[in-house]
Image (cartoon, rainbow, N blue to C red):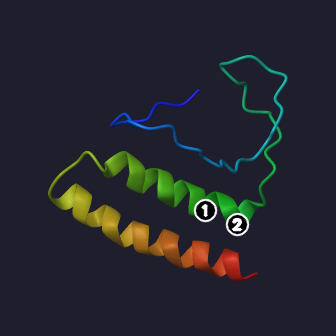
Amino acid sequence: MFGIHPAVSTPVQVLLTGILCPVTEIWPYNGSEIVPFHHEFFVALEEYATVYCRLKETGAEFEESLSLYQQYLSLAETYESD
């Protein structure tokens, strides 16, 4: 399920790309689920999550997140070229 804001006034066709990872456990997960990513991708995902969580902050907290975002972009670029 998705929400779009602001609402569009005409129909729009959207193409989504995602990762299917069936999990047979119910939420909350116990942490033993298999994740289809190599370890090096977790570093990039954790950096991006850190930046995303700091978007609502201001001042020094936000400024610090910008350097983490640059590190994330660098890692993402490296993995994309492989």
Q: Residue furthest top?
A: 26
- Spot occupied by residue 29 in the image (x, y as percentages of width and height): 70, 24
Side (left or right) of 50 relative to 12? left
Query: Which residue is at a point 60% across and 62% down the rendered structure image?
Result: 43
Estimate the x, y position of residue 4 in percent, counting from the top left: 43, 35
At label 2, counting other C-alpha atoms closer than 10 Å, the crowd grade (few under 14, some 14-19, many 20 or more) is few
SS class of the residue under badge 2? Answer: helix
Q: Name the kind of residue labelled 2 in the image.
A: Glu
Total residue callouts: 2
State if disc 2 and disc 1 touch (CB < 8 Å).
yes
Disc 1 residue type (three-letter)? Val
Residue drawn at point x = 74 percent, y = 60 percent:
39
User: Which residue sits furthest left?
Assistant: 59
Rendering coords of residue 11 (x, y %): 51, 37
Q: Kindly identify which residue carries mark 2.
A: 40
Query: Image quadrant for the C terminus?
Result: bottom right
Residue 26, by quadrant, is top right
Which numbered tag is attached to residue 43?
Answer: 1
Q: Is residue 16 above or below residue 76?
A: above
In the depicted structure, whether residue 63 falls above or below residue 34: below
